[in-house]
Image (cartoon, rainbow, N blue to C red):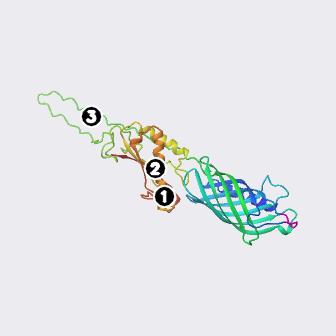
Amino acid sequence: MTFTRLALVSAIALASAAHAQEGTYITAGIGHVDNEIFDDLKTSAGKSVRDSYTSELSVGHFLMDNLSAELSLVGESPFQSETRPDITQVRLGGFFFMGQDALKPYLTAGLGYEEFDVPNEKQADDEVYMMNFGLGLQYDFSQNVFGRTELRVDNMFDASFEHGVFMLELGYRLGQVSAPVAKPVVQKIVKPEPVVAPKPVVKPEPKPVPVVIKPKDSDNDGVIDELDNCADTFAGASVNEKGCAVFQGTLKGVNFESGSARLTSASRTILDNAAAELVKYPTLNVLVEAYTDSQGSARFNQSLSQKRAESVRSYLIGKGVDANNLKATGFGEAKPVASNDTAKGRAENRRVELSVIK
């Protein structure tokens, strides 16, 4: 029917427009609909209206770490027979996810519009606005792919009938583009050549030899104190041109999946390089610090940052770094390095840092 074609075209257009947006996803699924969940729905012959099978296509976007909005379009399923009622819907719903694990329950509620068409029963057809509510369970198979099972009630505003809906869906997260891998840069420090005093000329009265004083390098890292921003670097550390350990400070490019503590593939490559540097110093104690932006509640951000710090610590341990030398602390939205009023500033505040513990 024309309505179904229009709905599918709208969904494809929305998916194309949202393709590059982080936090956007699409789902597709099939459902079984009980058309007599609370009240009997009869044909003109007095028979109960049969159940229906539907297919569903949705586009969603996360408004917060655990809250998303979805536009859903419902049409006929391949399993639908000609004797079963056809259901066509457009719904706008909200989803609240409980927890950050791969397996997490959720609640859903929304509003919509439905066309209900019973074969050969014009008096049983209906076009009506509705509300829906339900609950479900989602499992993340990978960084991008997830699955859902959902139980929902579609309640018509005119109180004519209700649906009981069971859905199975498969989803895909858009905009998960891997960032270029930023490898730690080890700046080779060239130590100044020792100044050799000229040999004294033998004369009847020898002159004193001039004394050359070398610039002071208190921590012996090859960078003189005047240019050294990290004057207490431990002995033997690989340092940059500012005299700081190459693995100390913000690890640029270490990111997580939206609203979770799972590392992206690009982040793992960066941490592999950091781990390779850390294992060179088996007696060094390092603190893993994680921070978030100010979106969401402070309590949630504190919990999320702690999980992310522990995720980085676990990954470094898995790459050979001694667990006794690593500690993890989450600071939530504290200590921002940029404004939380812009997307760029929030991205800078969502960071992971390493610092040497004395």
SS type, badge 1: helix
Tell me the chief SS of the magenta region: loop
Q: Which residue sits furthest left?
A: 204
Query: Which corner quadrant of the image does residue 8 belong to?
Result: bottom right
Q: Is residue 76 left or right of residue 208?
A: right
Location of residue 188 with respect to 199 vertically, above or below:
below
Which of marks 2 and 1 precedes in the sequence? 1
Disc 2, disc 3: CB below 8 Å?
Answer: no
Quote the CA–CA distance across marks 1 and 2: 12 Å
Label 1 sits on residue: 301
Observer-nearest of 137 and 288: 137
- Residue drawn 80% across and 66% down? 41
Q: Amino acid at mark 2?
A: Ala
Coordinates of residue 179 in the picture (x, y in percent): 55, 47
Label disc, if present, on residue 195 of the rendered structure:
3
Instruction: Say few, some or many: other residues with alpha carbon within 10 Å of mark 2 (under 14 / 14 to 19 / 20 or more).
Output: many
Observer-nearest of 335 and 37: 37
Instruction: Say few, some or many: other residues with alpha carbon within 10 Å of mark 3 (under 14 / 14 to 19 / 20 or more).
Output: few
- Residue drawn 39% across and 42% down? 325
Label 2 sits on residue: 309
Coordinates of residue 166 in the picture (x, y in percent): 71, 57
Q: Amino acid at mark 1?
A: Asn
Label disc, if present, on residue 101 of the rendered structure:
none
| Magenta stretch: includes residue 132 | no
Q: Nearer the viewer, mark 2 or mark 3?
A: 2
Observer-nearest of 239 and 281: 281
Which residue range is magenta in the image? 43-47
Q: Is residue 283 left or right of residue 5?
A: left
| Magenta stretch: includes residue 46 | yes
Where the N terminus falls, by quadrant? bottom right
